[in-house]
Amino acid sequence: MSKERRRRPAVSHPATVRGSGEQSAGFSLVEALVATFILTLVALSLAQLIGIGMLSNKTALDLTQATSLSGAKLEQLRNADYSSLVAGGSLVTSDVGYFDLVDTDGDGNSDYVRRWSITDQPGGKLVQVQVTSNTAAIGAAKSATMATVVSSR
C-alpha cells in the first residue's frame, strides 16, 4: 500500500498578501472621520427641525384655544339679556367688568386674557371679544378676535 503524501498549503507572508495594485477592504481613518462629520451635520439638522415642529405645535395650540375661548365668550354675550349689554370695555386694556383671566390647564396661572367691548350702534350693539395667550413663546403673543352684532329681541 502506498502512502499518499499530503501537501501542505503554501503559506504566504503578510507582506506579500497585499500586492501593490490591490486595495484594502476596510475604511481608512479619514473616511471614518468624514462619515462621522456628515452624520453629525444630519443629526443637528434633524434636531433643529424637531424644535421648529414643537414651536409650531405650541403656536397652533395657543391659536386654537384662543379661538375657542373667544367663541365661547361671544356666545355667552349674544345669549345674555339685551339690556345687560352695557356699552364699554376695550380690547387693549383690561377694564373692570369687561375682561377675565382663563386658566386652561388647571395649574392656578392664567393662560389667556379675554377682553371684550360693547359699542352701541344703529340696529343693535357691536360685541367684540379678543383672547390673548399669556404663555411665554417665541414671537408675538398669539390672539384671536371675534365680533358680532346683537339686536334687541
Image: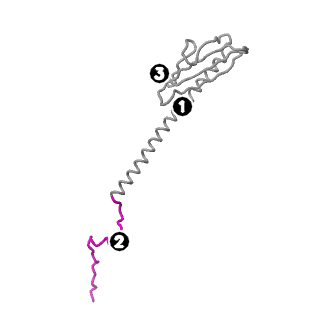
Q: Residue at x 56, y 29 (%)?
A: 63
Query: Separation of disc 3 and disc 2 at Cα?
Result: 74 Å
Q: Is residue 93 left or right of residue 43?
A: right
Q: Amino acid at mark 1?
A: Leu
- Which range of residues does the magenta coloring cover? 1-28
Residue 73 lies, in percent from the top left, at 61, 20
Quadrant location of residue 70?
top right
Quadrant location of residue 126?
top right
Query: Separation of disc 1 and disc 3 at Cα?
Result: 17 Å
Q: Residue at x 67, y 10 (%)?
A: 83
Please, what secondary structure does the residue beneath circle 2 have?
Answer: loop
Q: Is residue 12 above or below residue 88?
A: below
12 drawn magenta? yes
Mark 3 against mark 2, which lies toward the viewer?
2
Q: Is residue 12 above or below residue 1?
A: above
109 drawn magenta? no
Q: Which residue is mark 3?
A: 109
Q: Is residue 82 left or right of residue 15?
A: right
Query: Separation of disc 1 and disc 2 at Cα?
Result: 64 Å
Checking the image for residue 8, the label placed there is none
Chief SS of the magenta region: loop
Task: State the count of labels.
Answer: 3
Residue 125 lies, in percent from the top left, at 68, 15
Residue 5 lies, in percent from the top left, at 27, 84
In primary-sequence order, the first of circles 1 and 2 is 2
Which is more toward the observer, 106 or 97? 97
Q: Which residue is mark 2?
A: 21
Q: Residue at x 55, y 13 (%)?
A: 95
Q: Which residue is mark 1?
A: 61
Mark 1 against mark 2, which lies toward the viewer?
2
Q: Is residue 33 left or right of residue 47?
A: left
